[in-house]
Image (cartoon, coloured by chain):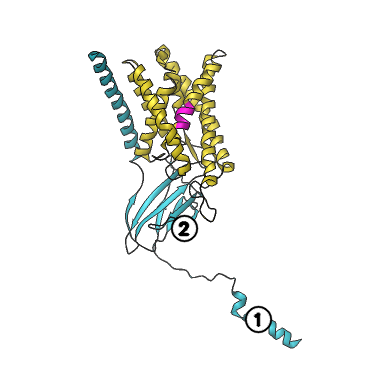
Chain colours: A cyan, B yellow
Amino acid sequence: MRWLGLLVVLGLCSPGVLAHDIQYRVQAGQALVVELDFPYGDPPIYESYEVFRPEESVAFQVGRTDGLGRVTLVPDRPGDWRLRVTTDDGHGLELTLAVDAQAQLEEVHGPGLPRLAAVLAGVGYLLGLGGLLLFWRHRHRAGS
Amino acid sequence: MHIPDGFLSPQTFLPAAALAVPAWMYAVRRVAAQLDEQTIPRLAVLTALAFVLTTVMIPLPGGTSGHLLGVGLLALAFGIWPAFLAYSLVLLLQALLFGAGGITSLPVNALIMGLLGAALAVGLHGLLRRWHAATAQVVAVWLSVLLSATAMALVLGAQPLLATDDAGRPLFFPFTAAVTVPAIVLPHLLIGLGEGLLTWMILRMAGPRRSGAMP
Protein backbone atom coordinates (compact mmCIF):
# COMPACT_ATOMS: atom_id res chain seq x y z
CA MET A 1 0.00 0.00 0.00
CA ARG A 2 2.92 2.33 0.85
CA TRP A 3 4.42 1.59 -2.56
CA LEU A 4 1.14 2.38 -4.26
CA GLY A 5 0.99 5.78 -2.52
CA LEU A 6 4.53 6.58 -3.60
CA LEU A 7 3.66 5.66 -7.16
CA VAL A 8 0.69 8.06 -7.15
CA VAL A 9 2.85 10.92 -5.79
CA LEU A 10 5.53 10.30 -8.41
CA GLY A 11 2.91 10.13 -11.13
CA LEU A 12 1.39 13.46 -10.13
CA CYS A 13 4.79 15.11 -10.17
CA SER A 14 5.76 13.86 -13.63
CA PRO A 15 5.58 16.35 -16.54
CA GLY A 16 3.29 14.00 -18.43
CA VAL A 17 0.43 14.70 -16.02
CA LEU A 18 0.68 18.38 -16.89
CA ALA A 19 0.68 17.73 -20.64
CA HIS A 20 -2.87 19.16 -21.10
CA ASP A 21 -2.08 22.44 -19.39
CA ILE A 22 -1.30 25.60 -21.34
CA GLN A 23 1.95 27.24 -20.37
CA TYR A 24 2.21 31.00 -20.56
CA ARG A 25 4.65 33.86 -20.95
CA VAL A 26 3.75 37.51 -20.78
CA GLN A 27 5.58 39.92 -23.05
CA ALA A 28 5.25 43.66 -22.98
CA GLY A 29 5.69 44.94 -26.51
CA GLN A 30 4.25 46.96 -29.34
CA ALA A 31 0.99 46.16 -31.06
CA LEU A 32 -1.19 47.84 -33.64
CA VAL A 33 -4.48 48.94 -32.12
CA VAL A 34 -7.26 49.67 -34.59
CA GLU A 35 -10.00 51.79 -33.03
CA LEU A 36 -13.41 51.50 -34.65
CA ASP A 37 -16.58 53.48 -34.30
CA PHE A 38 -19.94 53.91 -35.98
CA PRO A 39 -20.65 57.24 -37.72
CA TYR A 40 -22.72 58.44 -34.74
CA GLY A 41 -19.81 57.84 -32.37
CA ASP A 42 -20.49 54.57 -30.53
CA PRO A 43 -17.92 51.79 -30.90
CA PRO A 44 -18.85 48.44 -32.47
CA ILE A 45 -18.28 46.30 -29.38
CA TYR A 46 -17.90 42.51 -29.51
CA GLU A 47 -18.27 42.42 -33.29
CA SER A 48 -16.55 39.72 -35.34
CA TYR A 49 -13.28 40.39 -37.13
CA GLU A 50 -10.66 38.50 -39.12
CA VAL A 51 -7.02 39.43 -39.74
CA PHE A 52 -5.17 38.06 -42.76
CA ARG A 53 -1.38 37.94 -43.14
CA PRO A 54 0.08 39.38 -46.36
CA GLU A 55 -0.77 37.19 -49.36
CA GLU A 56 -2.74 34.69 -47.24
CA SER A 57 -6.40 33.84 -47.55
CA VAL A 58 -6.79 31.83 -44.34
CA ALA A 59 -7.34 34.10 -41.36
CA PHE A 60 -4.29 34.53 -39.10
CA GLN A 61 -6.40 35.90 -36.26
CA VAL A 62 -10.13 35.82 -35.63
CA GLY A 63 -12.13 37.19 -32.77
CA ARG A 64 -14.41 39.91 -31.58
CA THR A 65 -13.68 43.57 -31.01
CA ASP A 66 -13.10 44.41 -27.36
CA GLY A 67 -15.43 46.33 -25.06
CA LEU A 68 -14.13 49.61 -26.51
CA GLY A 69 -14.55 48.55 -30.15
CA ARG A 70 -10.83 47.88 -30.76
CA VAL A 71 -8.84 45.23 -32.60
CA THR A 72 -5.30 44.58 -31.38
CA LEU A 73 -2.83 43.02 -33.73
CA VAL A 74 0.85 42.02 -33.46
CA PRO A 75 2.21 41.54 -37.00
CA ASP A 76 5.05 39.03 -37.31
CA ARG A 77 6.08 39.84 -40.87
CA PRO A 78 6.15 42.86 -43.21
CA GLY A 79 3.58 43.45 -45.91
CA ASP A 80 -0.08 44.32 -46.33
CA TRP A 81 -2.18 42.94 -43.47
CA ARG A 82 -5.92 42.88 -44.05
CA LEU A 83 -8.49 43.46 -41.33
CA ARG A 84 -12.12 42.60 -41.99
CA VAL A 85 -14.80 43.56 -39.44
CA THR A 86 -18.27 42.08 -39.87
CA THR A 87 -21.42 42.90 -37.95
CA ASP A 88 -24.29 40.42 -37.99
CA ASP A 89 -26.60 42.98 -39.59
CA GLY A 90 -24.44 43.11 -42.69
CA HIS A 91 -22.30 46.16 -42.02
CA GLY A 92 -18.59 45.82 -42.37
CA LEU A 93 -15.21 47.35 -42.96
CA GLU A 94 -12.07 46.16 -44.70
CA LEU A 95 -8.75 47.86 -43.98
CA THR A 96 -5.26 47.18 -45.29
CA LEU A 97 -2.42 47.92 -42.88
CA ALA A 98 1.00 48.20 -44.53
CA VAL A 99 3.62 47.04 -42.04
CA ASP A 100 7.43 47.32 -42.40
CA ALA A 101 10.13 44.84 -41.36
CA GLN A 102 10.18 46.27 -37.81
CA ALA A 103 6.43 45.65 -37.49
CA GLN A 104 5.84 49.40 -37.65
CA LEU A 105 2.76 50.74 -39.37
CA GLU A 106 3.63 52.45 -42.66
CA GLU A 107 0.26 53.16 -44.21
CA VAL A 108 -3.45 52.43 -43.85
CA HIS A 109 -5.73 51.92 -46.83
CA GLY A 110 -9.39 52.18 -45.93
CA PRO A 111 -12.59 53.20 -47.61
CA GLY A 112 -13.82 56.62 -48.30
CA LEU A 113 -13.30 60.32 -47.74
CA PRO A 114 -14.07 62.25 -44.53
CA ARG A 115 -17.83 61.95 -44.05
CA LEU A 116 -18.92 65.54 -44.62
CA ALA A 117 -16.67 65.90 -47.67
CA ALA A 118 -18.11 62.68 -49.08
CA VAL A 119 -21.71 63.83 -48.52
CA LEU A 120 -21.04 67.17 -50.21
CA ALA A 121 -19.16 65.49 -53.04
CA GLY A 122 -22.01 63.04 -53.60
CA VAL A 123 -24.66 65.76 -53.65
CA GLY A 124 -22.48 67.77 -56.03
CA TYR A 125 -22.03 64.84 -58.41
CA LEU A 126 -25.76 64.10 -58.48
CA LEU A 127 -26.84 67.70 -59.04
CA GLY A 128 -24.08 68.15 -61.60
CA LEU A 129 -25.20 65.04 -63.43
CA GLY A 130 -28.75 66.41 -63.39
CA GLY A 131 -27.44 69.63 -64.94
CA LEU A 132 -25.60 67.71 -67.65
CA LEU A 133 -28.73 65.68 -68.40
CA LEU A 134 -30.75 68.86 -68.63
CA PHE A 135 -28.20 70.38 -71.01
CA TRP A 136 -28.21 67.21 -73.13
CA ARG A 137 -32.01 67.12 -73.24
CA HIS A 138 -32.21 70.80 -74.16
CA ARG A 139 -29.76 70.40 -77.03
CA HIS A 140 -31.48 67.19 -78.12
CA ARG A 141 -34.82 68.99 -78.29
CA ALA A 142 -33.29 72.03 -80.01
CA GLY A 143 -31.61 69.82 -82.63
CA SER A 144 -34.72 67.81 -83.47
CA MET B 1 -28.25 47.85 -45.32
CA HIS B 2 -25.75 48.01 -48.16
CA ILE B 3 -23.75 44.81 -48.48
CA PRO B 4 -20.02 45.63 -48.63
CA ASP B 5 -17.45 44.04 -50.91
CA GLY B 6 -16.07 40.76 -49.65
CA PHE B 7 -19.34 39.61 -48.05
CA LEU B 8 -20.86 37.94 -51.12
CA SER B 9 -19.66 34.83 -52.92
CA PRO B 10 -19.15 34.85 -56.71
CA GLN B 11 -22.07 32.39 -56.87
CA THR B 12 -24.18 35.32 -55.71
CA PHE B 13 -22.74 38.46 -57.29
CA LEU B 14 -22.08 37.05 -60.78
CA PRO B 15 -25.70 35.97 -61.44
CA ALA B 16 -26.84 39.24 -59.87
CA ALA B 17 -24.62 41.18 -62.29
CA ALA B 18 -26.03 39.15 -65.18
CA LEU B 19 -29.51 40.29 -64.12
CA ALA B 20 -28.62 43.86 -63.19
CA VAL B 21 -26.78 44.87 -66.37
CA PRO B 22 -29.75 44.30 -68.72
CA ALA B 23 -32.03 45.87 -66.12
CA TRP B 24 -29.85 49.00 -66.08
CA MET B 25 -29.77 49.10 -69.88
CA TYR B 26 -33.54 48.83 -70.06
CA ALA B 27 -33.92 51.50 -67.39
CA VAL B 28 -31.61 53.91 -69.24
CA ARG B 29 -33.60 53.51 -72.48
CA ARG B 30 -36.90 53.85 -70.69
CA VAL B 31 -35.89 56.88 -68.64
CA ALA B 32 -34.08 58.67 -71.50
CA ALA B 33 -37.22 58.49 -73.58
CA GLN B 34 -39.43 59.99 -70.87
CA LEU B 35 -37.32 62.56 -69.04
CA ASP B 36 -38.07 66.18 -69.84
CA GLU B 37 -36.76 69.56 -68.72
CA GLN B 38 -39.21 69.67 -65.81
CA THR B 39 -38.57 66.16 -64.52
CA ILE B 40 -34.76 66.15 -64.68
CA PRO B 41 -34.11 68.83 -62.02
CA ARG B 42 -36.66 67.23 -59.67
CA LEU B 43 -35.15 63.79 -60.21
CA ALA B 44 -31.65 65.19 -59.56
CA VAL B 45 -32.72 66.97 -56.37
CA LEU B 46 -34.66 64.01 -54.95
CA THR B 47 -31.81 61.63 -55.86
CA ALA B 48 -29.43 63.93 -53.98
CA LEU B 49 -31.88 63.91 -51.07
CA ALA B 50 -32.03 60.10 -51.13
CA PHE B 51 -28.22 60.07 -51.11
CA VAL B 52 -28.14 62.35 -48.07
CA LEU B 53 -30.79 60.23 -46.30
CA THR B 54 -28.61 57.14 -46.70
CA THR B 55 -25.72 58.93 -44.98
CA VAL B 56 -27.62 59.82 -41.81
CA MET B 57 -26.88 56.98 -39.42
CA ILE B 58 -29.45 56.33 -36.70
CA PRO B 59 -28.29 54.50 -33.57
CA LEU B 60 -30.58 51.56 -32.82
CA PRO B 61 -31.14 49.46 -29.69
CA GLY B 62 -28.58 46.66 -29.43
CA GLY B 63 -25.56 48.75 -30.37
CA THR B 64 -26.11 48.72 -34.10
CA SER B 65 -27.15 51.46 -36.50
CA GLY B 66 -29.43 51.98 -39.45
CA HIS B 67 -30.20 54.57 -42.06
CA LEU B 68 -33.08 55.55 -44.29
CA LEU B 69 -33.01 54.33 -47.89
CA GLY B 70 -34.88 56.97 -49.89
CA VAL B 71 -35.83 54.58 -52.66
CA GLY B 72 -39.52 54.64 -51.75
CA LEU B 73 -39.52 58.41 -52.17
CA LEU B 74 -37.95 58.13 -55.63
CA ALA B 75 -40.32 55.33 -56.62
CA LEU B 76 -43.50 57.13 -55.59
CA ALA B 77 -42.33 60.40 -57.14
CA PHE B 78 -40.99 59.08 -60.46
CA GLY B 79 -41.89 55.40 -60.90
CA ILE B 80 -39.96 52.14 -60.79
CA TRP B 81 -37.34 52.53 -63.53
CA PRO B 82 -36.17 56.08 -62.79
CA ALA B 83 -36.02 55.13 -59.11
CA PHE B 84 -33.98 52.01 -59.89
CA LEU B 85 -31.54 53.96 -62.05
CA ALA B 86 -31.23 56.90 -59.65
CA TYR B 87 -30.83 54.64 -56.65
CA SER B 88 -28.15 52.58 -58.41
CA LEU B 89 -26.25 55.84 -58.82
CA VAL B 90 -26.72 56.57 -55.12
CA LEU B 91 -25.34 53.13 -54.27
CA LEU B 92 -22.37 53.62 -56.61
CA LEU B 93 -21.52 56.94 -54.96
CA GLN B 94 -21.96 55.39 -51.52
CA ALA B 95 -19.47 52.68 -52.45
CA LEU B 96 -16.93 55.04 -54.02
CA LEU B 97 -17.10 57.88 -51.51
CA PHE B 98 -17.85 56.11 -48.22
CA GLY B 99 -16.90 52.49 -48.80
CA ALA B 100 -20.49 51.71 -47.79
CA GLY B 101 -21.63 48.92 -50.03
CA GLY B 102 -19.23 47.90 -52.75
CA ILE B 103 -18.57 47.37 -56.42
CA THR B 104 -18.94 43.58 -56.56
CA SER B 105 -22.00 43.82 -54.32
CA LEU B 106 -23.51 46.73 -56.31
CA PRO B 107 -25.72 44.51 -58.52
CA VAL B 108 -27.21 42.75 -55.48
CA ASN B 109 -27.71 46.01 -53.59
CA ALA B 110 -29.23 47.69 -56.65
CA LEU B 111 -31.55 44.79 -57.49
CA ILE B 112 -32.81 44.37 -53.93
CA MET B 113 -33.00 47.96 -52.71
CA GLY B 114 -33.34 49.79 -56.04
CA LEU B 115 -35.50 47.53 -58.19
CA LEU B 116 -37.34 45.31 -55.69
CA GLY B 117 -37.77 48.20 -53.24
CA ALA B 118 -39.11 50.53 -55.92
CA ALA B 119 -41.40 47.88 -57.44
CA LEU B 120 -42.83 47.00 -54.03
CA ALA B 121 -43.40 50.65 -53.11
CA VAL B 122 -45.17 51.42 -56.39
CA GLY B 123 -47.13 48.15 -56.41
CA LEU B 124 -48.29 48.38 -52.82
CA HIS B 125 -49.14 52.05 -53.21
CA GLY B 126 -51.24 51.18 -56.24
CA LEU B 127 -53.12 48.59 -54.23
CA LEU B 128 -53.69 50.76 -51.17
CA ARG B 129 -54.22 54.29 -52.47
CA ARG B 130 -57.97 53.90 -53.01
CA TRP B 131 -58.30 53.13 -49.33
CA HIS B 132 -56.51 56.26 -48.04
CA ALA B 133 -53.93 58.17 -50.07
CA ALA B 134 -51.62 59.35 -47.28
CA THR B 135 -51.74 56.09 -45.34
CA ALA B 136 -51.10 54.21 -48.57
CA GLN B 137 -47.83 56.09 -49.07
CA VAL B 138 -46.64 55.42 -45.53
CA VAL B 139 -47.64 51.74 -45.52
CA ALA B 140 -46.31 51.07 -49.04
CA VAL B 141 -42.90 52.53 -48.22
CA TRP B 142 -42.80 50.84 -44.82
CA LEU B 143 -43.58 47.41 -46.28
CA SER B 144 -41.22 47.91 -49.21
CA VAL B 145 -38.36 48.70 -46.81
CA LEU B 146 -39.28 45.71 -44.65
CA LEU B 147 -39.48 43.25 -47.54
CA SER B 148 -36.27 44.57 -49.12
CA ALA B 149 -34.55 44.16 -45.75
CA THR B 150 -35.85 40.60 -45.55
CA ALA B 151 -34.52 39.81 -49.02
CA MET B 152 -31.16 41.34 -48.10
CA ALA B 153 -31.01 39.30 -44.89
CA LEU B 154 -31.78 36.09 -46.78
CA VAL B 155 -29.09 36.78 -49.40
CA LEU B 156 -26.53 37.47 -46.68
CA GLY B 157 -27.68 34.50 -44.62
CA ALA B 158 -27.30 32.19 -47.61
CA GLN B 159 -23.57 32.94 -47.95
CA PRO B 160 -22.34 30.37 -45.38
CA LEU B 161 -24.26 27.73 -47.36
CA LEU B 162 -22.89 28.81 -50.74
CA ALA B 163 -19.14 29.07 -50.17
CA THR B 164 -17.03 27.30 -47.55
CA ASP B 165 -13.42 26.16 -47.30
CA ASP B 166 -12.31 22.53 -46.92
CA ALA B 167 -12.99 22.65 -43.20
CA GLY B 168 -16.53 23.89 -43.78
CA ARG B 169 -15.83 27.45 -42.61
CA PRO B 170 -17.62 30.23 -44.49
CA LEU B 171 -15.38 32.03 -46.98
CA PHE B 172 -17.50 35.16 -47.12
CA PHE B 173 -20.23 36.49 -44.82
CA PRO B 174 -20.19 34.14 -41.80
CA PHE B 175 -23.68 34.39 -40.28
CA THR B 176 -26.70 32.35 -41.31
CA ALA B 177 -30.26 33.58 -41.88
CA ALA B 178 -31.10 32.67 -38.28
CA VAL B 179 -28.86 35.59 -37.28
CA THR B 180 -29.24 37.97 -40.21
CA VAL B 181 -33.04 38.00 -40.46
CA PRO B 182 -33.69 39.28 -36.93
CA ALA B 183 -30.58 41.49 -36.98
CA ILE B 184 -31.61 43.24 -40.20
CA VAL B 185 -35.38 43.00 -40.33
CA LEU B 186 -36.25 44.05 -36.77
CA PRO B 187 -34.45 47.44 -36.93
CA HIS B 188 -36.11 48.07 -40.30
CA LEU B 189 -39.53 47.83 -38.68
CA LEU B 190 -38.70 51.25 -37.21
CA ILE B 191 -36.58 52.53 -40.07
CA GLY B 192 -39.29 51.68 -42.61
CA LEU B 193 -41.94 53.43 -40.58
CA GLY B 194 -39.77 56.54 -40.30
CA GLU B 195 -39.05 56.40 -43.99
CA GLY B 196 -42.75 56.01 -44.79
CA LEU B 197 -43.64 59.08 -42.74
CA LEU B 198 -40.80 61.13 -44.22
CA THR B 199 -41.78 60.11 -47.75
CA TRP B 200 -45.36 61.16 -47.12
CA MET B 201 -44.21 64.54 -45.75
CA ILE B 202 -41.85 65.20 -48.67
CA LEU B 203 -44.42 64.20 -51.29
CA ARG B 204 -47.01 66.35 -49.53
CA MET B 205 -44.66 69.33 -49.71
CA ALA B 206 -43.83 68.55 -53.33
CA GLY B 207 -47.57 68.81 -53.99
CA PRO B 208 -49.15 68.37 -57.40
CA ARG B 209 -45.83 68.95 -59.19
CA ARG B 210 -44.93 65.32 -58.49
CA SER B 211 -47.37 64.30 -61.20
CA GLY B 212 -44.49 63.50 -63.56
CA ALA B 213 -44.37 59.90 -62.33
CA MET B 214 -43.19 57.37 -64.87
CA PRO B 215 -44.34 53.92 -63.79
The residue wearing badge 1 is: A11
Quick one: SS at disc 1? helix
Q: Residue B104: x percent and y percent?
A: 40, 40
Magenta span dominant secondary structure: helix
Marker disc for residue B37: none
Chain on which label 2 sits: A
Residue drawn at 58 percent across, 71 percent down:
A21
Residue B14 lies left or right of residue B175; in this view the side is: left
Chain on which label 1 sits: A
Examine the rendering and report whether any part of residue B49 can be seen.
no
Quick one: SS at disc 2? strand
Residue drawn at 46 percent across, 22 percent down:
B199
The residue wearing badge 2 is: A61
Asked if residue B202 is positioned above or below residue A62 in the image, the reply reads above
Residue drawn at 60 percent across, 77 percent down:
A16
Residue drawn at 33 percent across, 64 percent down:
A102
Q: Which residues are magenta?
A: B111-117
Crowdedness of circle 2 by 10 Å Cα count: few (<14), some, many (20+)? few
Disc 2, disc 1: CB below 8 Å?
no
Residue B122 lies left or right of residue A136; in this view the side is: right
- Amino acid type assigned to the residue bearing label 1 in the image: Gly
Whichever of labels 2 and 1 marks the residue nearer the N terminus, that label is: 1
Asked if residue B165 is positioned above or below residue B96 in the image, the reply reads below
